[in-house]
Structures are given as C-alpha cells and as structure tokens.
Amino acid sequence: SSVAGLVDAFLTGVVAGYGIAIPVGAIAVLIVEVGIRCGFRCAAAAGAGAATADFLYAGLAVIGGAALVGVVESLDRPLHIVSAAVLVVIAVVGLRRVGRTRESVEFSFPDRRELAGTYARFVGLTIINPTTIVYFAAVIVGLGVADDLSAAVGVLFAVGAFLASLCWQTFLAGVGAVAGDRLSARAQTGAIVTGNLVILVFAIAIVFR
C-alpha cells in the first residue's frame, strides 16, 4: 500500500470512530454519570473500555467483513433483547444506589483494581451492541478501504477508529468530572437520576426498534 493509502485508511478510521462515538447513547450517558459520581479517572477508564470495544469491532470488520455482518444480523433480535435487559439492570441499580446514599464530590481516588474493573465493565457493556461491526464494515466497503485492504491498511483503520473514539469518550469523562466538581450534592443526585432514567428510555427504545 502507498503512503497516501495508509494515511487515507487512518483518517477514514478516525472519521468512522467519531461517527460511532459521538451520537448520544446509553454508553455516553453512563460515562458522564460515572464522571459525576466517581471522578475523572473512573470515567476515563470507562471511556477507554468503550473505545477498546470499538477497536475490537473495527478490527473484526476488517478481518471478517460481510461474513461477520451476516452473523450479527441473524442474531440481531436476541442481541437487542440482551442489550436492553442489561441497560435496565444498570439503570435500576443506579437508581437504587441514589436512594440509599448521597455521594458528594468528596470521593477517594479509586485504586488500580477498581479502575481495571470499570474498564472491563465498559468493554463488556459496549461489546453487547455488535451492530457496531455492521457500521464499520459498511464504512470499509462504502468508502473504498476494502479496495486496497492490506494488513497495514486494516490496522491503521482500526487504530484511527480507536483513537477517535478514545478522544471523544475522554471528553465525556471530563464533562462528567467537571460537572461533579461544580454541582451541589442535590444537583449531582438529580443528574445521576436523570442519566439512569435516560438509560431506561434507551432500553425501551432498543426493545421496540
């Protein structure tokens, strides 16, 4: 592949990464909520988990392409039900936690194990929406990346998607952390409740989509 082709693959990955990350969804709301409740380091770990899932799906789209898209589409309904159920559980647990405790901005810094756990949870939460692979496969074919699909092109596409997604998720983590620092305890509670209610709405929308 030429240098221009490699650069194009990377930039296409960047655009695709922003395209999948920026639309507001349940994961975005959760990352902001984690930032409000737990601070920037927790939320950044959550965002890195979401970006890692996007990287994995971008890589799978490069490797498997249309064949994997067919598998995902055949399992579309069961996967949507599982995704909606997980979001309902997250929202209910979040609302119950707000009812039991009033967490303020005076939190202790999470240790490495807690950060690793948050990262792993968000990899899992993001990966239960495998329609992401359909999106990346469509980008690869539609924008011509597949026309010159060497290993280097595929890697650069996936890396570009990962970096763009990570950039956006980290921004969301910062938004949540800043809001947590500046909001009163009552306002924090209101924001967390609203976020969890929005997640419930996303769950209902997934079921009836």
Image (cartoon, rainbow, N blue to C red):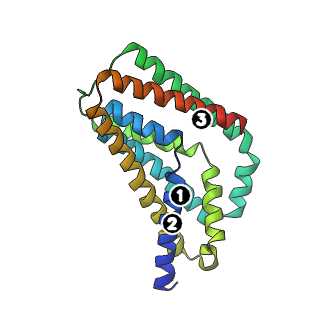
Q: Position of residue 25 (x, y in %)?
A: 54, 42
Image-based side of 115 in relation to 196, left or right: left
Kindly identify the residue that appears in the image at 51 percent across and 66 percent down: 13
- Type of the residue with mark 1: Gly
- Of residue 184 and residue 75, the one placed in the foreground of this image is 184
Q: Residue at x 39, y 45 (%)?
A: 172
In the picture, measured across the screen, residue 177 lies left or right of residue 118, that is left
Above or below — where is 20 with respect to 62? Answer: above
- The answer to whether 161 appears left or right of 136 in the picture is left
Q: Position of residue 101 (x, y in %)?
A: 36, 16
Q: Are marks 3 and 2 in contact (CB under 8 Å)?
A: no
On the image, numbered disc 2 is attached to which residue? 13
Q: Estimate how packed mark 3 is, as few (under 14), some (14 to 19) or many (20 or more) residues with alpha carbons within 10 Å.
A: some
Hey, what amino acid is under mark 2? Gly
Query: Quick check: can you spot residue 110?
Result: no
The residue under the point 73% across, 40% down is 77
Mark 1, residue position: 19
Q: Is residue 150 above or below residue 54?
A: below
- N-term-proximal mark, 1 vs 2: 2
Residue at 38 percent of width and 23 percent of height: 189
Asked whether residue 109 appears in the rendered view, the answer is: yes
Expressed as whole percent of the image width and height from the top left, the position of residue 46 reads: 41, 42
Circle 3: residue type: Phe
Q: Nearer the viewer, residue 128 or 34?
A: 34
N-terminal label among 1 and 3: 1
Considering depth in this image, is 183 or 109 the residue closer to the camera?
Answer: 183
Q: Of marks 3 and 2, which one's residue comes earlier in the chain?
A: 2
Q: Residues within 10 Å of mark 2 (few under 14, many from 20)?
A: many
Measure the alpha-carbon separation of dots 1 and 3.
19 Å
Helix, strand or loop under label 1: helix
Identify the residue position indicated by label 3 in the image: 202
Q: How crowded is the residue under tag 1: few (<14 C-alpha within 10 Å), some, or many (20+)?
A: some
